[in-house]
Amino acid sequence: MIEFKNVGFGYSSKKGIAKIFENLDFTIKDNEFFCVIGPSGCGKTTLLRNVAGFEHPTEGVIMNDGRPVEGIDYRRAMVFQDDAVFPWLTVYKNVEYGLKVRGVSDDIRQEKVKHYINLVGLTGCENALPKELSGGMRKRVDLARVLANEPEVLLMDEPFGALDAMTKEVLQEKLVQIWNESKRTIFFITHDIEEALFLGDRVGLLHRLSDGGELEFFNVPFDRPRDIYLKQQPEFQAMRRRLAEKFHQSGKGGAES
Amino acid sequence: MTTGKETNVRIKCYIVIICAVLFGAWCLLTYKMGVRAVILPSPTDMVRAFRQLAPSLPVSIAASLKITLIGFALGAAVGLLLGLIMGYSKIFLQVIGPFMEVTRPIPVFALIPLFMLWFGIGILPQVLLIALGVSSILGVQTYEAIRNMPVVYVQAAFNLGASKMKVFKTVVIPCIIPHLIGAVRVAAATSWGLDVCAEFMGVQTGLGHIMIIQQNYLNTPQVLAIVLIYSVLAITLDQVIRIIEKGATTWTDRSSLSFEGLTTEGKMSRKEKQAEKKALMELKMQERK
Ligand SMILES: Nc1ncnc2c1ncn2[C@@H]1O[C@H](COP(=O)(O)OP(=O)(O)O)[C@@H](O)[C@H]1O
Ligand SMILES: [Mg+2]
């Protein structure tokens, strides 16, 4: 359970503190798939970095399982918006990285790496270097690398934002499948409303601070397991439209990415 | 478009032609136009010079090689270490950084006389001199490479559970190596220069020492011969570094220049332009008929 208690954050700049968001007060339940959407620059990445422990709230506190988040922890694992796969390591060694630096023993390591490479569908590519892979495959490596550590919370920052529609759909299904098999909390950021509705149990729409900075919640009513045909259902489209209206009201004057 | 193989053959042809022209000019100047051997020795003079130097060469080459390589290795190790520590510890950077900034612009060559006074005329001052020059180049370059590396790799490593020390070993070092190759090559070239200088200044062994003696007798062919030997040594070291580079940087995208093999639309080679003109002319001729 991740609790946000009156959380606010500002980057300190020359002119003082540049507030990004404030007064966020909500809870993400255990094993919830929580998606946040919002216009570009509203502070989605910053919010996630606060949960990961890369930044620290300037007001309030974020609690994970009753303990305040004080720093970076592999149990709250981040999948970055940018390509973060180590280009000097092979696929195998990338996936192995977290286990290795944490001192997990050889045989367990081997087993887990094999399992997670297989899970993301990269068996056969173990010895490839990242430069030989497509963007979608590199995201799979990134995902496997994070999953191999078996984190309690997955923090994902527009992980599929740079991928083409086809690859994106395949990876969305994969992610849901993985989440179904071994439940864990996922905090997923996207600027794609359809993606948020397809993946999430609940969607939060974060407004820019200049537009009030509110975080609006929407429960996603669709049953699981969901397949990609859900996206064509009228109820899905209706909800998408409702959110899109809110989104564009909020994002007026800003680009959507 | 030409195929890669054709281009290769053409490049080799150009190189052979340029070499032939240079050699021809050399022969012409020395044999026909009577340029004196003191100014520019002829090929025959050079052969004679090598013969005369041959007995003393092995010892001298070994002496120069030893000093340069020891100095270079020592300097590279110290420089890399300093750069890494400056990247690792902010306190160290803030204490040592200003000293490095102030001392770096001092030309190392200017320190040669002092080094001889302080450390005598044995192998020590030379080795220290070369090490100093190399380490000041590599220290700064290592630190800069660390500063310029993508933050996301470091953050990802921490987030996967690595400690600061582990991040340095497994992320920072592999990540900066490709960016250091250039600096290592410059440092290697500099270390040869420092070796020559130090030997000029009074060291009793080595190629530079023979060079100074020969120069006193105005034996230009011998001087030139030693310059050639230095060049061969320097080029060999450079090639060794490049071979190591190839092994260490296979993971990067850069193979050659990134803009090679790209052409923009609308820009045609002269041949293509001429072909197009010709085609147009022919069309017009046909229309007239
Ligand atoms: N390191 C930083 N220092 C100062 N301001 C920053 C920094 N990172 C982001 N910002 C600012 O914070 C705001 C929110 O950024 P971000 O969280 O990346 O937005 P989003 O991910 O929603 O697009 C932006 O206006 C951005 O300019
Ligand atoms: Mg962002």
Image: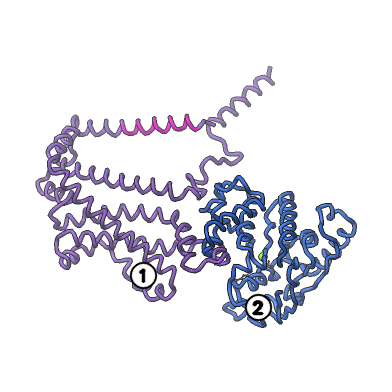
Chain colours: A blue, B purple
Question: Is B73 covered by the magenta stretch?
Answer: no
Cα distance between the residues tagged 2 and 1? 37 Å
Name the front one of labels 2 and 1: 2
Q: Nearer the viewer, residue B243 or A13?
A: B243
Callouts 2 and 1 in the same chain: no
At 32% from the left and 62% from the top, the residue drawn is B135
Q: Is residue A224 visible?
A: yes
Please state the extent of the stretch shown in magenta in the rendering: B4-19
Q: Nearer the viewer, residue B240 or B102?
A: B240
Q: Quadrant of residue B262?
A: top right
Q: Nearer the viewer, residue A210 or B116?
A: B116
Mark 1 beta carbon near ligand 1 (under 8 Å): no
Q: Which residue is mark 2?
A: A9
Q: Position of residue A84 (x, y in %)?
A: 58, 59
Q: Which residue is mark 1?
A: B101
- For label 1, the SS is helix
Q: Position of residue A215 (x, y in %)?
A: 77, 74
Q: Quadrant of residue A198?
A: bottom right
At 19% from the left and 48% from the top, the residue drawn is B62
Q: Position of residue B281 (x, y in %)?
A: 62, 24
Q: Quadrant of the N terminus of chain A?
A: bottom right
Residue sitting farthest toward the right: A234
Q: Residue flagged by tag 1: what amino acid is it?
A: Glu
Left or right, A205 with respect to B163, comes to right
Q: Is residue B36 visible?
A: no
